[in-house]
Image (cartoon, rainbow, N blue to C red):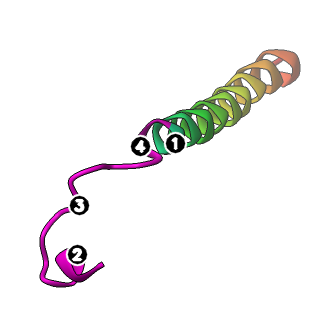
Amino acid sequence: MADVDRGESPSRLEGKFSAAVACWILGFGSLICWNSMLTMGDIITIIYSL
């Protein structure tokens, strides 16, 4: 732990893949929600435009 306290980067980055997977899942989930909201707006516009 003394090496990390001097401001140097650790030599092994443990959990890098897990962090990348978690970020990808969260990003994809946000994209799906955003796409659903935009699609819902388009559908409501089509339904209620007379």
Alpha-carbon span between mark 3 and mark 1? 21 Å
Q: Are marks 3 and 2 in contact (CB under 8 Å)?
A: yes
**Residue 50: image location, x then y, percent:** 84, 17
Q: Which residue is mark 3?
A: 10
User: Is residue 48 shown above or below 4?
Assistant: above
Q: Secondary structure at mark 1?
A: helix
Q: Which residue is mark 4?
A: 16
For image coordinates 23% across by 82% down, the residue present is 2
Q: Marks 2 and 4: which is nearer the front?
A: 2
Closer to the N terminus: mark 1 or mark 2?
2
Q: Which residue is mark 1?
A: 23
Which is nearer the eye, 36 or 24?
24
User: Is residue 32 shown above or below 13?
Assistant: above
**Residue 24: image location, x then y, percent:** 52, 33
Alpha-carbon span between mark 2 and mark 4? 17 Å
Alpha-carbon span between mark 1 and mark 2? 24 Å
Q: Marks 1 and 2: which is nearer the front?
A: 2
Q: Are marks 4 and 1 in contact (CB under 8 Å)?
A: no
Q: In the rendering, which numbered label is found on residue 4?
A: 2
Q: Residues within 10 Å of mark 4 (few under 14, many from 20)?
A: few
Magenta part of the chain: 1-17
For image coordinates 13% across by 83% down, the residue present is 6
Alpha-carbon span between mark 4 and mark 3? 12 Å
Q: Marks 4 and 3: which is nearer the front?
A: 3
Closer to the N terminus: mark 3 or mark 2?
2
Say if the magenta span includes residue 11. Answer: yes
Q: Residues within 10 Å of mark 2 (few under 14, many from 20)?
A: few
Q: Amino acid at mark 3?
A: Pro
Q: Residues within 10 Å of mark 1 (few under 14, many from 20)?
A: few
Alpha-carbon span between mark 3 and mark 2? 6 Å
Closer to the N terminus: mark 3 or mark 1?
3
